[in-house]
Every structure is written in structure tokens, then in C-alpha cells.
């Protein structure tokens, strides 16, 4: 029995097509136990889509989950750490803070000859599209009736990939230099001569003269 399951997010749609080994009439939703094809379509202007079989899908969910885990933990693990895995069909590379390159290589175990249809496919995803893809993968893992045997085992990153913290001595030296610079500036300011302040002459009181005309008696204030 052919089964199709879809998982959607604002900018990504994941479609799985597979078979059910056994279907009981009492089951309202049959269990997909075999995957025939997986297609991931991105709702962008170019309409990019990637597809493949079981090997492609396992590599996709593993690589995307590990890549986003490294992003959130700020510990980027090189691709060479996963060389022990038998399948390396999907890779993710960070181009900048908002762009990520998803590359899908042809399945080397399929026995198909190399050609235009089997060349590597590259899709540049924004951070929003990447996390929408993660959301569709999370929806798949939350569905217990679709490929229940497929599990995701995320291991913590090795300590050798964690960037060492800056030593305390290196953090103290810039602060000490800043404090000493302020102290030297204060000492230089104290050694400057005190400027002499002169009162403006325009503010000093000036003697007043009273002009009298002949034949007039000057007035004197009352005692």
C-alpha cells in the first residue's frame, strides 16, 4: 500500500512516499515502514527542490540537525568529524551570518553513471529557510506512524572544538592600561599652571560727574 505524508512550514515542504508492510482495517492511519522517495521543496522565487531515497533522507536529517545544533551552541564542528559515517550525501556550509549552502551529492551506491541528472545539487538557504527545514524535520520525528525505525542520535561536540576562553591575565591587561592612562592624564592635569583670572574693567564702578550750569545751585541729598 502506497502512503504519502507531508510536513509543511512557511517556506519549506517535506513530502515522503513509501509503503506499509501491513495494514489493518482497524487502523485509521497506516504506518509507513519503507521509504521510496523523499522530496524537500523550498517556497522561494526559484522553486528549488531536492529529492532522493532513504540514504538521502537519513543524511539530510542528520546533517541539518547537527549543523543547527552547532549554530545554536556556537561550536562549529568540521565535516571531517563525521567521516566514519558510511553515507555523505548532504553537506551544509556557512556562507555568512544569513546564508547557508546545502549541497546534495549523488548516491554513490546507486550504480548510476555520472551525468547531468546525477551531478551535485546546490541550494543557498537563508537562516529563516534553514530553520523552516528544521521545523519540518521535527514534525516528521514527532510522527510515530512514519518510519518509526529512523532515529536521530545527536552527540555533544568534542571539547577540542570549543574555543578556549581568554585567559584572565589577558582580560586584566587592557583594563589596567585604561586605568593607568586615566591616572597619567589626571597627574598631567594637576601639573598645569593655574591660569590668572582678570576681572573685566567694564564691570568696575566708574566715578560719576555732575555738570552744573551757571546760576544754578547744586542739589545735595538730604541728611
Image (cartoon, rainbow, N blue to C red):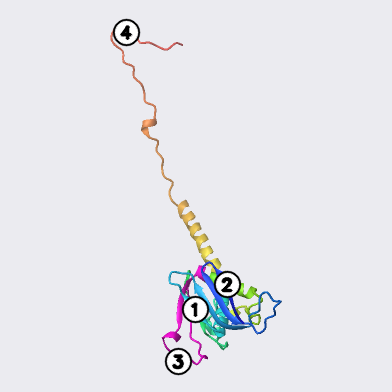
| Left or right: 84, with 122 as reference point | right
Segment colored magenta: 100-129
Q: Secondary structure at mark 1?
A: strand
> Between residues 67 and 26, which one lies in front from this camera angle?
26
* Distance in Å between CA atoms under marks 3 and 2: 32 Å
Q: Earlier in the sequence, mark 4 or mark 2?
A: 2
* Distance in Å between CA atoms under marks 1 and 2: 15 Å
Q: Which residue is mark 4?
A: 216
The nearer-to-camera label among 4 and 2 is 2
The nearer-to-camera label among 3 and 4 is 3
Can see residue 60? yes
Q: Earlier in the sequence, mark 3 or mark 4?
A: 3
Q: Earlier in the sequence, mark 1 or mark 4?
A: 1
The nearer-to-camera label among 1 and 4 is 1
Q: Which mark is residue 113?
A: 3
* Distance in Å between CA atoms under marks 4 and 2: 115 Å
Q: Which residue is mark 2?
A: 7
Badge 2 crowding class, 10 Å Cα cut-off, few under 14, some 14 to 19, many 20 or more, is some
> Between residues 99 and 214, which one lies in front from this camera angle?
99
What's the residue at 48%, 60% (across, down)? 181
Q: Earlier in the sequence, mark 3 or mark 1?
A: 1
Q: Which mark is residue 50?
A: 1
Look at the numbered discs 3 and 2 and tell me whether their residues touch, using CB distance below 8 Å. Answer: no
* Distance in Å between CA atoms under marks 3 and 1: 19 Å
Amino acid at each position: 500500500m502506497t502512503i504519502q505524508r507531508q510536513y509543511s512550514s512557511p517556506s519549506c515542504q517535506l513530502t515522503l512516499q513509501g509503503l506499509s508492510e501491513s495494514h489493518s482495517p482497524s487502523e485509521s492511519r497506516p504506518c509507513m515502514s519503507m521509504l521510496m522517495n523523499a522530496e524537500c521543496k523550498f517556497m522561494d522565487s526559484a522553486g528549488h527542490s531536492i529529492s532522493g531515497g532513504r540514504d538521502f533522507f537519513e543524511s539530510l536529517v542528520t546533517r541539518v540537525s547537527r549543523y543547527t545544533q552547532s549554530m545554536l551552541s556556537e561550536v562549529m564542528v568540521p565535516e571531517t568529524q563525521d567521516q566514519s559515517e558510511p553515507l555523505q550525501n548532504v553537506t551544509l556550509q556557512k556562507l555568512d551570518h544569513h546564508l547557508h549552502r546545502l549541497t546534495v551529492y549523488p548516491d554513490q551506491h546507486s550504480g548510476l553513471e555520472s551525468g547531468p541528472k546525477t551531478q551535485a545539487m546546490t541550494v543557498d538557504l537563508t537562516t529563516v529557510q534553514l530553520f523552516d527545514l528544521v521545523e519540518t524535520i521535527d514534525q516528521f520525528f514527532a510522527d510515530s506512524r512514519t518510519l518509526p525505525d529512523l532515529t536521530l542520535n545527536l552527540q555533544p561536540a568534542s571539547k577540542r572544538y570549543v574555543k578556549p576562553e581568554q585567559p584572565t591575565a589577558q582580560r586584566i591587561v587592557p583594563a589596567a592600561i585604561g586605568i593607568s592612562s586615566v591616572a597619567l592624564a589626571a597627574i598631567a592635569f594637576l601639573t598645569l599652571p593655574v591660569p590668572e583670572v582678570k576681572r573685566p574693567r567694564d564691570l568696575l564702578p566708574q566715578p560719576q560727574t555732575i555738570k552744573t550750569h551757571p546760576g544754578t545751585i547744586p542739589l545735595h541729598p538730604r541728611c
